[in-house]
Image (tube, helix red, strand yellow):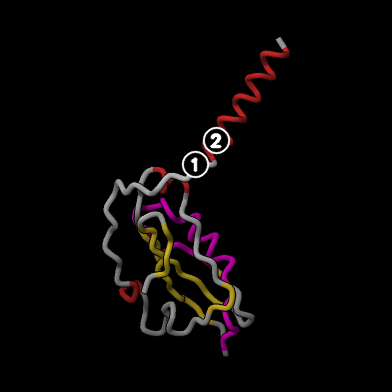
Amino acid sequence: MKTVASFFGIFSATIFVTSCASTSTFNPRSSYPPDPWVKGYSNPDDCIGGEKLAAIDFDLPTYPKSAFRNGQQGWSIIRLDVDADGHTQNVKIERSVPSGMFDTASRKAVDAWRFRPPQTPLSDCRVLLRYRAGQASLGG
């Protein structure tokens, strides 16, 4: 009986490793939703990505595996503050389409971003992250 259990354990592990190593291409099953007008979510005194933000450590999010596998595309508007040392604070998803699909990946990436320390801390900055054709990019 022990031999059978060991075999199934090895077999299960082999299937898991093989499925994780898949190099499939992105097969869109949803249209990319039109980009939002990010300034429409902000007030005149808020900072919008690129206008006041100068990144020094900036990695784009990893495309969520489930979204990639299901051919999902979309975007997230992220609201954040930047403290006097250039670290992100209070990272929140302002809106995302489809709702919730890219929130975790977006928040995780933005939490790790670092900016050139501003003269005064920045609040209510907004950044658009696009998830399109299996790749994440920064919106304009």
Looking at this view, is 8 or 107 the one in front? 8
| Residue annotated with mark 2 | 18
Q: Is residue 34 magenta?
A: no
Q: Residue at x 36, y 84 (%)?
A: 44
Compare residues 24 and 81 and report the one nearer the observer: 24
SS class, disc 2:
helix
Q: Are marks 2 and 1 in contact (CB under 8 Å)?
A: yes
- Please report the bounds of the magenta region as a residue range: 91-118
Q: CA distance from mark 2 to mark 1?
A: 7 Å
| Residue type of the residue flagged with mark 2 | Thr
Q: Amino acid at mark 1?
A: Ser
The residue that appears at 37% across and 79% down in the rendered structure is 43
The correct choice, above or below, for 28 with respect to 12 in the image is: below
How far across and how far down the image is residue 5, in percent? 67, 16
Residue under numbered circle 1:
22
Quadrant (top left, top right, bottom left, bottom right) of the C terminus? bottom left
Q: As displayed, is residue 125 above or below residue 64?
A: below
Q: How many numbered dots are placed on residues in this image?
A: 2
